[in-house]
Image (cartoon, rainbow, N blue to C red):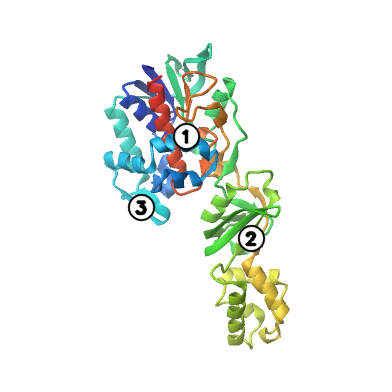
């Protein structure tokens, strides 16, 4: 049994790993350079903390966008239902909202962090406000760590330093560097769940939210994403829940290899939409085309649709031809958006890439190269959709790492 364990990183995965190891009877020291624990956790879910998703392990697996099979063991051992029971048991009443997203009833992410801190202290965890610089290893096994304040001897080390998104919270890539120093493969780090920069100028659309639309993404002719929901136009392009989820499916090749289309009226077939437009045209027969779309589209979107339709904006509605109307229907069903880049990785919700899961034991999260080194949370090459799934990855892998380290 590993008697002395170091946990590097006081985020979601690190705190859960420390708690799991402590409950197994190990002596645990948690190293976190920030003055407070859970700095990123405190801002998740817009400060409300989407703790998990009230789904089955099978449904959870369907929402992992990278290396889902790797999660099978850990999520079945510490399921979303178990996570909910854990936090309720820590004195954090929960509620379930749209999309089965689970939040604290208080809508305060700080309550989640405080409950974890309270649990750590009750179990006797030592907490050091130090930055870990290196992991010491000899003969293929962990021996200890080096921090900005000195050297320590440990039987096992759990790395839980997060990805490289939100660097202001301490996710600065330290864990990737330490893993690479030990010969562990780290895959390319890219932003995921991130807004998209578009070729089209979107200044006039900035602030426009489209609800109940269907966003589809294609790589070549192949559809890689299609979902109904909400999206937002910004000064640089597009964002919002649909776009963030779509970005996770745009990691292959270059962003520019993809095209996006928006079905602005997914509830209507082309024939039904044409009938609706005809009805509006009859209503506004004496008006210019540009002034006939107010019942159909948000005001901010009309100038863009008029330009893309190729129909002269000042043509009288009564003069719009059947062919023109057909083009308008096609445009409203497939409004085009041209992605040219992701926003910077420090604006991403999660990091795509990380320590290769091929180098980790999925049951224990221990490195296959360095005995006694465990890697969990966003530091590993695992990511998922929004909706509580990424935090579930942190809880499940942290729990697995903590228990396995204590039993080493």
In the picture, measured across the screen, residue 328 lies left or right of residue 95, that is right
- Quadrant of the rendering where the N terminus is positioned: top left
- Label 2, label 3: how far apart the Cα atoms are: 31 Å
Whether residues under marks 3 and 1 lie with C-beta atoms below 8 angstroms apart, the answer is no
The picture places residue 248, in percent across and down from the top left corner, at: 57, 46
Residue at the disc numbered 1: 377
Circle 2 SS class: strand
Whether residue 363 is visible here, answered yes or no, is yes
The picture places residue 278, in percent across and down from the top left corner, at: 62, 82
Q: Nearer the viewer, residue 157 or 267?
A: 267
Residue at the disc numbered 3: 96
Circle 1 SS class: helix
Between discs 2 and 3, the one toward the N terminus: 3
Q: Is residue 162 above or below residue 240?
A: above
Determine which quarter of the picture holds residue 331. Answer: bottom right
Between discs 3 and 1, the one toward the N terminus: 3
Outermost bottom residue: 286
The picture places residue 309, in percent across and down from the top left corner, at: 69, 71
Between discs 2 and 1, the one toward the N terminus: 2
Q: Nearer the viewer, residue 104 or 213?
A: 213
Whether residue 14 is visible here, answered yes or no, is no
- Label 2, label 1: how far apart the Cα atoms are: 33 Å
- Report the residue at 64% width, 52% height from top: 197
Determine which quarter of the picture holds residue 79. Answer: top left
- Quadrant of the rendering where the C terminus is positioned: top left
Local crowd at mark 1 within 10 Å, few (<14), some, or many (≥20)?
Answer: many
In the picture, measured across the screen, residue 330 lies left or right of residue 18, that is right
- Report the residue at 56% width, 75% height from top: 296
Circle 3 SS class: strand
Residue 261 circle label: 2
């Amino acid at each position: 049994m590993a008697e002395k364990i170091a946990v590097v990183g006081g985020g979601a995965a690190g705190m859960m790993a420390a708690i799991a190891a402590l409950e197994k009877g190990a002596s645990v020291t948690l190293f976190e350079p920030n003055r407070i624990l859970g700095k990123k956790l405190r801002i998740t879910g817009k400060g409300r903390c989407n703790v998990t998703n009230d789904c089955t392990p099978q449904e959870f697996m369907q929402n992992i966008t990278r290396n889902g099979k790797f999660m099978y063991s850990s999520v079945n051992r510490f399921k979303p239902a178990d996570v909910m029971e854990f936090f309720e048991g820590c004195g954090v009443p929960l509620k379930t909202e749209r999309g089965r997203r689970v939040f604290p009833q208080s809508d305060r992410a700080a309550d989640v962090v405080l409950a974890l801190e309270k649990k750590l202290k009750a179990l006797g965890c030592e907490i050091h406000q130090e930055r870990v610089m290196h992991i010491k290893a000899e003969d293929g096994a962990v021996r200890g760590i080096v921090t900005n304040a000195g050297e320590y001897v440990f039987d096992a080390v759990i790395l839980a330093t997060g990805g490289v998104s939100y660097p202001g919270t301490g996710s600065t890539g330290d864990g990737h560097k330490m893993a690479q120093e030990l010969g562990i493969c780290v895959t390319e780090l890219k932003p995921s769940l991130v807004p998209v920069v578009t070729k089209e100028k979107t200044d006039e659309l900035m602030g426009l939210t489209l609800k109940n639309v269907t966003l589809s993404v294609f790589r070549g002719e192949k559809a890689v994403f299609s979902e109904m929901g909400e999206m937002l136009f910004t000064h640089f392009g597009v964002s919002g829940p649909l776009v963030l989820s779509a970005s996770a499916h745009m990691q292959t090749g270059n962003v520019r290899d993809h095209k996006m289309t928006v079905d602005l009226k997914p509830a209507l077939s082309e024939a039904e939409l044409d009938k609706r437009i005809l009805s509006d045209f009859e209503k506004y027969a004496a008006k210019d085309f540009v002034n006939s779309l107010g019942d159909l589209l948000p005001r901010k979107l009309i100038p863009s649709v008029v330009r893309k339709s190729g129909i002269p904006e000042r043509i009288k509605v009564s003069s719009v031809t059947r062919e023109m109307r057909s083009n308008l229907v096609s445009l409203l069903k497939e409004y085009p958006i041209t992605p040219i880049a992701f926003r910077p990785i420090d604006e991403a919700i999660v990091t795509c890439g990380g320590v290769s899961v091929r180098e980790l034991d999925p049951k224990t999260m221990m490195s296959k190269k360095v005995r006694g080194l465990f890697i969990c949370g966003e530091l590993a090459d695992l990511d998922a959709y929004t909706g509580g799934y990424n935090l579930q990855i942190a809880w499940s892998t942290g729990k697995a790492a903590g228990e396995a380290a204590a039993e080493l």
